[in-house]
Image (spheres, helix red, strand yellow):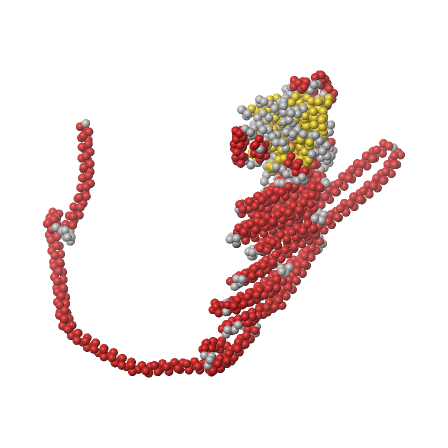
Amino acid sequence: MSEQINESDLRKKNLKKLLQTYYGNTTKQTTKSLQKEQLDLDSGRFKVDLYFNKIIKENNIQKLVNHQKKTKKELKEYDNSLQKLVYQNYHKFLSATDMIKDMSSTVDNMEGEINKLTMHMKNLEKYQANIDNKMKDKRTKINNLINNHELVTKLQFLFELPQKMRLCIKMGEHSQAVNDYLKCSDVLHRHSNLASFQGIISECNKIVSEIKKYLFGILKDGQSKKKNINQVVRLLVSLDVPLDQLTDDLLSHKSSKIIKVFESYQEKEFQELKLQLEEFKLRNKKKLRAQTGKNENANENDKEFKTEMEKDQKENASFEENLSNNFQNSLSSFVEEFIDEFVWFSRSYKKLFLNNEIKEKRKKEIKYCERRLKSENEKLFNQFFKVICPILFNRNLKLSWIKKIIGTIINHIEKTKDLISDSIQCNKIEKMINNCLNFHINLKFSKVIYRFKKFLNIKNQIFSRKMNEYFKKKSKKGLIELKKNEDKNNYDEEKIEEIKKESENKKEIEKEKENKKEAEKEKENKKEAEKERIKVDTLISDTFTEINLYIIKNVEKLVVDLSYLFGISDDFSNLKKNFLPVIKQIRKNLNTNFNKKYFPILIGLLQINIQKLLLKINKIINNYNIIKKNNAKKNLDENDSKQKNELTNVNNLYLDYDFKSLNPYRKKRMKGKGRKDKEEGHKTNAFFYLVLSKIMNSLFEKDIIDFLGEFSWLFGEEGFNIASSIGSNPNRDHKENKKLIHVLDKLMKKCDIKTVIENTGLISISCLNRFVFLHGRNLSQLIMNSIETPNWVSVEQPKGVRIIIQQLFNQFKIANKIILTSFEKERQDSSNNKKNKANSETESVKSWSSRSKGSNIAYSMKESNFASRNERKDEKYRLIENNIEKLFSNKIQIFENIEPNRDSIITGIGKVALKGFVESVRQTTFGTNGFNQIQVDSFFLRVALSKFIERSVLNYLSDEIVDSASRRCLKPAKIDPSLVESICKEILEKIMI
Amino acid sequence: MSLGLKFQCSTLDSLKDEESLKFIVGTKSLRESNEVHVLEYEPESNRVKPFSVYSHKNEIWDICSCPWSSSKFFTVYNTGTEFCSTLWSTNQENESENENKNDNLNKKTNLEKEEQDSNEDEDKDEDEDESNNPNNGLKKLYPLVHLPTPEGKISSVLFNTESEIQDRVISFDEKCINVWSLEKLETDKIATNISQARVGRLEKISSGGWNPTDPNLVAIAIESNLSIWDLRDMKKESFVIRQAHEDRLRTIAFNRNSISQVASGGDDCKIKFWDLRKIQRGLENNEEPQDLLTLTGHSHWVWQLEFNPIHDRLLLSSSTDSTVKLWDAPSLAFKDLRLEELESDPDNDFDQDQFEQDIDEYEENKNKKVTTQKDGLLNTFEDHDDSVYSIAWSKTEPWFFASISYDGRFVVNKVPEEIKEKILD
């Protein structure tokens, strides 16, 4: 316990110490500051004792002495300065007292002088008042005199007024005369009771009427200047001329002037323009003729035509430029003049007549004036339209020119916007422009259709000619051969009769021989026919590609033109109304003209292209809608509903069209008796997708997307239609589309432009995929049919590649050609691909035989395997081996996404086709010969298709074909590869050439 | 789980077995002697075990197990010159029983003799017996009934799985639909032809299906057309869906739970669902037939379709693009139809509690219906490297299914658990 107490005490002590140190410090500090103050000589708290003690304590004697000296000095200085101060102040004090003494003495004198001054001032005032009184009378007299003088002068002016006015008129300054008159007229009228005044008034009136006459004369004279007329009119108005008469005169004057402008233009420049246009037209016709001629005689006079054409083209180009420049210049100057006149006219009119001052005065008259102005304006505009319409509605104008012209017109009219607040004129102009545009769009369409027609006619003619020739040849050949056969038969019969007599046994042998011969001939015939068919195929493909290219070009042009037009102005309310009939017309034309054509592919393609056209048109209409939306956000709701209605109308129309136009074609396809028709139907279908995808792709990639980019969402919509109709049975297209429209209406609201652009890309890809799949399927069907029909067990030994397989190759060739037209440039790794291609081509051309040797090795390897297997007689191991092989080889996807380039597309087709081959082989049973045939075929395909299809894929699939065939073979015995090679050699060489 | 068979195969079926998951596979090897494998799958160990192997002389193109007995099955096979079809039994007792049933007791002893006389195959069978059995230890199959096929090649034989007509079998060949009776035998082991339907001269049947709920209804595929026949009137088809697919039709599957629902698959890589009653009615009114649903996803021919026997919203498809795909079509499933009926006439239920319960259930289901997924692809199984020619749901445990590809790989798969849960909810 005690220990604890001690501890607590210690703690307290420590705390106290700490506190003391802390607070003690502060007290010291304060005392220190105090001490400092007490020690400072200058401070108020200085304490002598402390200072003294401190100094004595701190310093030794010497220092103290020094300190004393210092202080002494300082003290002395202080004393001196004190004395000085005292003396100076004393002086000042003395002078001040002197001054005060002087002041008091002078003030006493001041008072008397001031009193004197006031006295004098009073006297002055008195004198002045006296003078004023004396002068008053005279002053009033003078004033009267002055007034009288003024009156007299005024009277003089009045009496001299008529003379002055006459003088002014003589001098030609009517305005001054009128001004003078106006100044006086009030006075004159006021005092008209007086006789003398009356005379003046009558005289003045005479003169004024003269002036009026003169002024009206000026008005009626057409040649006076604008400023003058303004003045004249102003004067006339101030002279209180009845306004109606004035306006009549003025307006007639104006209109006569403007009409003169019109007339001058009509007479001179526009006639020239018309002439030029006609020339242009003629030239175009020539050009067309030359082109058609060229097409027809392409082979004969190529060079001459080319040079001529080039010349023509150059001339035409320069001519066109001149013409367009002339056109623009004259038209724009015309419009400018007209509008300047008009603007000036209406402006001045307003200034003059519709002033507020005048308005208050003559309300009735002004109303009349306004009416007059309106009517006159209308007249003028009507005339303007009369003049300008025949020019704008000229058939030979180009759209680009029209765009410029309309642009200038619109520019000019914008100047007048403040003036032509009357909506009548605005509407009229807009209507005019709309009509013009409609007219030209109609024209353009009809032109395009006309071009289509012509083009197709030419194509058809050429085609039909060629076909006819071909058929004639064929038939002739056939006839000749038939005749020959008949002759021989007759001959043979004779022989046979002879032989009959000789022996019966021989006869049978002969017959057999004959049969064999005939069979051979038939085969030859077949071969020839096959060749012809190939020719026809190439022909078809050529025409296909041409038509495709042509149509794509045209459509693109048209779209560019149209979009060009739509870029100009904002309001085309009539356009939409007019558009439907246009489309209907197109439809009619198409239905009447093309359904009769005998070649269904052309129709199909054309219809497809027109569909595309419609699609694009649709899109443009919608572009326009969107523009309108942007412009008029206020009326959004109303517009929206209207637009939607219209949209659906267009859509329905399109669908209607689609359905009707394609139906007969479909029926044909459905009714088609042979497989051929069906195939052709499929073919067009497939290529339709190709073309579509191409267009989509071009939209996706090219510049068109730049200006259509924002609007492509609608195209995307159509794309949806297509994409989904792709998946549906043709019979059910219509219903589905209707459903789709419903869905798409919803989509449209949500759709965002970017995603839609992406969608176009996606659609193009899906179209491509579809194309590849369809075409591949068509080809695989070809193969399947060829495999399913014959009895492969009892087939003869292979003598060559089967014709169907050759045809397959040709199909690939054609497809390749067509694909090349649309997808010429490979996008990615083009250089690599090209290199590869080049390599492969050189390889295939130069050393296909050597390569086939390479494959020989593979074959012989397999051969040895075969042999050993046959020896071992257990296929179980083979399967296992095969599986192991497959494990190490990459799994080949039959159908991957296709890239938009030739290689990918055609390998895609090849994959699908050959996979079909494999599958159909797996379902049939082969004899040895049949197996060998397949061997030959697959070898042929492997070499021939190496141009098109990726090597690894091709090898894999052709191996698979042979392998599965060998499994399905009753007695698999491979032919020697060299034999296979020799069998294929001829055909392969032909192909390579 | 997969197993590699030594031979090529193109067909399999599941066996009716109450205890284990068994599948039957026929090999297809042209030059070798073929085998019928019965494979057993053990879900616990996830293993496929060969249960037993039987020798079968000729290559097997199609196999169809009897829905009532695990020991009987049909095979369609190619002798090299012609296609035949035979009902086999794995044990002799069954055979005798069967014949007892058939009231052919006396002929039992004569059977084998007559077999020797009448059948070409029989000699070969004997050869097989002599050569293969001792060597490979393969079991023997006992032929029960032959289907005489004088013309054309048989493509498939079908039992009617749901109906009680157990003695009827339908076979399809290129030209005809044949209905056979297994009980009344013409001569020994030769089935009697009850009725026959013939298609047009240029037409060719590629496959067919038999409606399990309405055994008078048969659908066959002719090129791209789907043709419907009524077995009571075999002179002419009752109606045809023209251009049902863009290309050749490969397979037809009837939905067991729905009276008139059919799925078809073809070379255009699509799977389509049809309501036959609706179409028939539509055709009478000259309407164009329209499919209920189209599923796309395969990149090559669709070779076989199978509805799940219990959950009919699940559809399995096999394709030559070497995939097996599992599809879900809840919008077409049977359950929904039943619910709609419930909605339409709830007055029939007099029991208040029952009624309320039903309504509650219905409400629940309705909510679920909203939340259930849309029709479409559920899963793709890429176990195979070559074309998958055949698939089958297990008859004992319908969450499992087997598939076989050209290279002889046999794979058993399961419906993924998540999907299973969703469906069971």
Image quadrant occupied by the C terminus of chain A = top right
Up/down of A464 relative to A939, above or below: below
Q: Residue at 57% x, 45% y: name it.
A: A744
Look at the image and tell me whether residue A382 can be seen: yes
Q: Residue at 85% x, 40% y: name it.
A: A490
Viewer-proximal residue, A230 or A157? A157
**Percent from the top left, x then y, of residue A785?**
70, 36
Image quadrant occupied by the N terminus of chain A = top left
Viewer-proximal residue, B2 or A591? A591
Q: Name the quadrant containing residue A137.
A: bottom left
**Percent from the top left, x then y, of residue A795?**
73, 33
Q: Is residue A91 left or right of residue A833?
A: left
Q: Residue at 72% x, 37% y: name it.
A: A800
Q: Residue at 59% x, 31% y: name it.
A: B312
**Percent from the top left, x then y, of residue B328?**
57, 34
**Percent from the top left, x then y, of residue A857?**
65, 34
Up/down of A831 relative to A370, above or below: above
Viewer-proximal residue, B340 or A903? B340
Viewer-proximal residue, B246 or B57? B246
